[in-house]
Image (spheres, coloured by chain):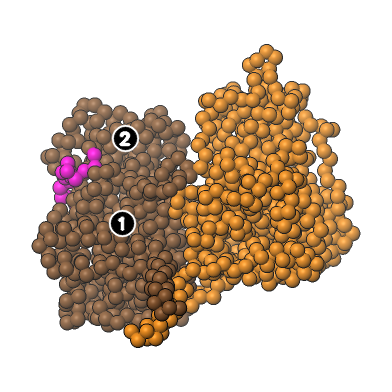
Chain colours: A brown, B orange
Amino acid sequence: MSPPLWIAAWALLLHGCAAGRAPRAPSTRSDIRDCSAEPPYLPPTATNTTARLAVLRGILRTHGAHAYIVPSTDAHMSEYISERDARLGWLTGFTGSAGTAVVTRDKAALWTDSRYWTQAERELDCNWELQRTTSIESIATWILKEVPAEGNVSLDPFLFSIDTWNSYSRALHGSGRTLLPLETNLVDQAWGDQRPPPSSSEIYSLPAEFTGSRWQDKVAGIRQRMEQHARRPTAVLLSGLEETAWLFNLRGDDIPYNPVFYSYTLLTNTTISLFAGQARLSQEARQSLRSGCPGPLCVELHDYGQVSAHLRRYAQGNVTVWLGTEYTTYGLYATVPQEKLLEESYSPVMTAKAVKNAHEQEMLRAAHVRDAVAVIQYLLWLERTVPQGRVDEFSGAQRIDAFRWAQEHSRGPSFESISASGLNAALAHYSPSNGSSRTLSAREMYLFDTGGQYLDGTTDITRTVHWGEPTPLQKEAYTRVLMGNIDLSRLVFPSNTAGRTVESFARRALWDVGLNYGHGTGHGIGNFLSVHEWPVGFQSNNVPLEAGMFTSIEPGYYQDGDFGIRIEDVALVVEAQTEHQSGEKPFLTFEVVSLVPYDRNLIDLSLLSPEQIRYLNSYYERIRAHVGPELRRQRLEDEYVWLQESTEPFPVSSAGSAAAGSLALAALLSVLLSGLGA
Amino acid sequence: MSPPLWIAAWALLLHGCAAGRAPRAPSTRSDIRDCSAEPPYLPPTATNTTARLAVLRGILRTHGAHAYIVPSTDAHMSEYISERDARLGWLTGFTGSAGTAVVTRDKAALWTDSRYWTQAERELDCNWELQRTTSIESIATWILKEVPAEGNVSLDPFLFSIDTWNSYSRALHGSGRTLLPLETNLVDQAWGDQRPPPSSSEIYSLPAEFTGSRWQDKVAGIRQRMEQHARRPTAVLLSGLEETAWLFNLRGDDIPYNPVFYSYTLLTNTTISLFAGQARLSQEARQSLRSGCPGPLCVELHDYGQVSAHLRRYAQGNVTVWLGTEYTTYGLYATVPQEKLLEESYSPVMTAKAVKNAHEQEMLRAAHVRDAVAVIQYLLWLERTVPQGRVDEFSGAQRIDAFRWAQEHSRGPSFESISASGLNAALAHYSPSNGSSRTLSAREMYLFDTGGQYLDGTTDITRTVHWGEPTPLQKEAYTRVLMGNIDLSRLVFPSNTAGRTVESFARRALWDVGLNYGHGTGHGIGNFLSVHEWPVGFQSNNVPLEAGMFTSIEPGYYQDGDFGIRIEDVALVVEAQTEHQSGEKPFLTFEVVSLVPYDRNLIDLSLLSPEQIRYLNSYYERIRAHVGPELRRQRLEDEYVWLQESTEPFPVSSAGSAAAGSLALAALLSVLLSGLGA
């Protein structure tokens, strides 16, 4: 019953951040729209969808369908989608990133989660009912009410995950309605000429210096995993866009923020078939892919749209196709007979990609040093300009983007910047827009969650700052979020530990006083790939942690209508040095690679244990050692001074040192007493 | 692919305790038996199974079967089974609690886990191959090799969980072999007259003072849950023995250690059918059950064996049957058509039973006070007698049983006592036997994991002690196990938190230095019911923690061939007092109800944080307040003195108090200096 993977990641991480909020009572809530007025009242932001709905309904009839389900994702279960795939947005006018629409012959409804209710009310016209939930059970109940018995409920099977398809199938089972897959997409038909064309930009090879290993070696490694698997699969099917991009060291720009391109790959034990816009491949990329032809390392190039037909033909043989069920669409999955499938949550490419080799680790570390420079520049710039009232959330986001663009190997932001001041930060997914963004103030907290794409790595960091006098609650909450970040970062744990079994260490300091946050604690991250990279992280569907994996660590706290705090770093899983060792493998811990100091103004040192302070000081030493020289190299002297001040060691008032103080005093006392002749 | 529930619980808790052990290399290991010698060598402990195998094979042929799979559990997936259900033991000679046998027309093999390899070699004769694994994949591979294509692989579907059945089914799918359920059990046929008869002992009503609520109120509560469920089930099927015992406030003694009786219940919205040995019901029990006749609170009594036929008839109607898939057998499950099933992991009786009401909580607390008296008597007795070399593991276990029997409302031990000295404690499941048990010594550590059944509650506690000079590693490991116990016990966490997300707090102090333990961290516990009560606990298939649940907390450490440590307490989940509150429900914490001090001789106080020491002192205060008066009431003056000594508060050398000391010294110093005229 889980939603598509990428959406699940995003929703779990950011949805429900206001866990402390009282739930809205839907009964007392009134819609911004007033569809019962004569004429109906609609805000000016609403889209008139009458004509496009009429066209879609005509097409629906010609297919004998009584309802059509439209999801928000693309054929690769991507987290971000291209304009061409924004079918839900075009049909409904709703531009939020998550939702499901259902159109029957006389009704239309949109389901979305609480993050988007207000936005949906502003964007939908009166053709649309707004359903304030996302449960498939709710969608199915609505369908059962609106679609006649014996009716057909149709959808495009290439836009639904296996799980979601099965949920609809179960819900309609025995009801007399049929779940009818239609290979042609009806929204695309209705959209017609107005639909944006496919991307025609170049698909290029990543320069050798920015790759972890040659694509031929990656292919050999995957084929080895196939041979070693008990079921002896003959092929691996790759439908995640990062899978193909990673395997062949290729990149593109079909999707905002993620340097990938529309593609599929069928890697068999003897052949390699890449499905993508052939004409878009750079000369160099084409040469690289064809360099092993003919032979088992020859990449056969096919058009993107040929994947289903090719897979169907392949599946007629005596074959076993390995695929990742968490992100393969039902349409593709159903192309292969059940007994010829090797179903695992993730493909071997996904799990191989998750463990970075030494060169990839070095690249990610280096990208984070330059990224720290940009973030430090921004923090100093804010310190100087915010008190003058000249920065708002939007111009701030533009400024940090600009600082990043100036860094070497930069390729722009890795996701839409979150730049939130005061109460806006309590909405953890908030992104400002030009013209309606809050001015930053020394009287309010400010949270920014941003990241960069660099040829050598992808970054993601959140800092929360206050330039004035924070309230006691703000200071306590910030310190406890920091304590959680520290406690998880410094944790030592056995090899093969699942992230979900340790993520509570990031919450305990908050829990102690009855506080919490409603999102996940972290996600994997790619090398110049997705900023949310599966399958690493702290959620229940993540794989166990292994040395070489990168994950974000990002506890937070959100006080509804007031302020929001999040402290996010990216960390590498490394072997720990322990005195003993239970088990065969070394224990693990984290090495934080984000290298930006926290806001001293918000830290209540008395809450920290001596161990936490010592950890913080050693982290600050590492920041000085790695970022200091880079600031000097870039001749950022003011930033260098700022960094030194911001990373001054904190005093460790531990039991040990206090006791030592007592001893010193006692010794002095005894000298004095003897001096007194006592 | 999970094994039956109760076995999974036991195995996860106790199997693999020696996580630090190097794995045995099967290739270099030789069997105690020498079946290739002429004549074969067998230890005297082996059972001759030639005749019984011949009988079984004859029966196999008459059923057209080529293989028969024999599991170790009973028709209720019970953790402990009666002699009558010890089919695996009778057929193979192997008396371990977990294993699977497969008999073909010319071969026989037994699969069991590493805890039992040596025992199996001692008990099996040369008719049996020993397979040193328990994976169903391994069993299926063996079957595919030994059973001809088109052959029938048969089994008793009423002895396999749904999951296990499905695993076999998947493994044989497409192989040409058929998985053939036989309702008559072939081992029982072969066993014939020699099979122990069914229990004829009385099934009795629990006196009203020992019940949490009237059975009629429990039935009403379950019917309410049925009405409130979206699927509107018409019936609940109860096949766990604790389910029926709890629902009707009935007890029996069909199973060792667990006061339950063979039974099933079908509770519909209008009727109640109890399947059990009718003649065995006490007069009082019968009257209570029949008191609401005729009417919806009338319990119709049926023979135990009628459940399948009755259920089959019931399932012909327009009904929906709610059952718990974690512990219902495939045979019973398959009796109801799929579309008439409401499948959840646990029945509503299981989840209702897990949350104890105020009276049940009071009873469990009271039972633990008396249990603490028995354990304290034992600890003092050990202190006096061990140095004289007069106690061994077996006589020790007998002694603590005797101390418990002397307590009010005692009904004997709640499981087979674990009493392990020195290296034996490294095997966490070790139970001593008469004549071959190790003498306790002041030079070795001693671990005892024992519990009692009382009419008002079930107890389970583990203490580890050393009467001499522990090694530095023993002391460090003990202290870190204790720190884990404390850290989890004092944790404050949000309502509805899953146990598996917090159990690592019990491990962190060990992890810090590269140590760990290989078993689970705790399990639910009943009110005069099972000592391992599902679905509460810290494993992935446990339900979220709620106020009113009881669970054990039992971290440990096991040094192979040397020593073993476990510190186990039972704790009640209670509401926490927090300064703030994120979310609608109060935060939770634990109240430890086991009230026995830990061994001061093994605690390295310098490792504990001030918070841990403060927690320990407040726990010791509670022990004094609750157990002290009971010791006096029972005129156990020596034990009272021992308790006072053992619960002396520890000094808190915290930063705070040390700083206060510094301040006092500084003040004194300033007085002195001013006195000196400085």
Label 1 vs label 2, nearer the camera: 1
Residue depicted at x 32% and y 54%: A591
Identified by mark 1, the residue type is: Val
Looking at the rendering, the stretch of residues picked out in magenta corresponds to A191-213
In this view, the residue in front, A380 or B199, is: A380
Give residue B47's position: percent from left, percent from top: 74, 27
Residue depicted at x 60% and y 59%: B600
Residue depicted at x 28% and y 71%: A599
* Residue A297 in view in this figure: yes
Q: CA distance from mark 1 to mark 2?
A: 29 Å
Q: Is residue A201 magenta?
A: yes
In this view, the residue in front, B138 or B459, is: B459
Identified by mark 2, the residue type is: Gly
Residue A302 image-quadrant placement: top left
Label 1 is found on which chain of the structure? A
Residue depicted at x 21% and y 54%: A367
Q: Secondary structure at mark 2?
A: helix
Q: In the rendered structure, which disc, 1 or 2, sits on the residue that comes first in sequence?
A: 2
* Residue B210 in view in this figure: no
- In the image as oriented, which residue stretches furthest toward the left? A635
Give the label on residue A221, or none. 2
Residue B95 image-quadrant placement: top right
Give residue A409's position: percent from left, percent from top: 15, 53
Residue A256 against residue A359 in the figure, above or below: below
In this view, the residue in front, B8 or A118, is: B8
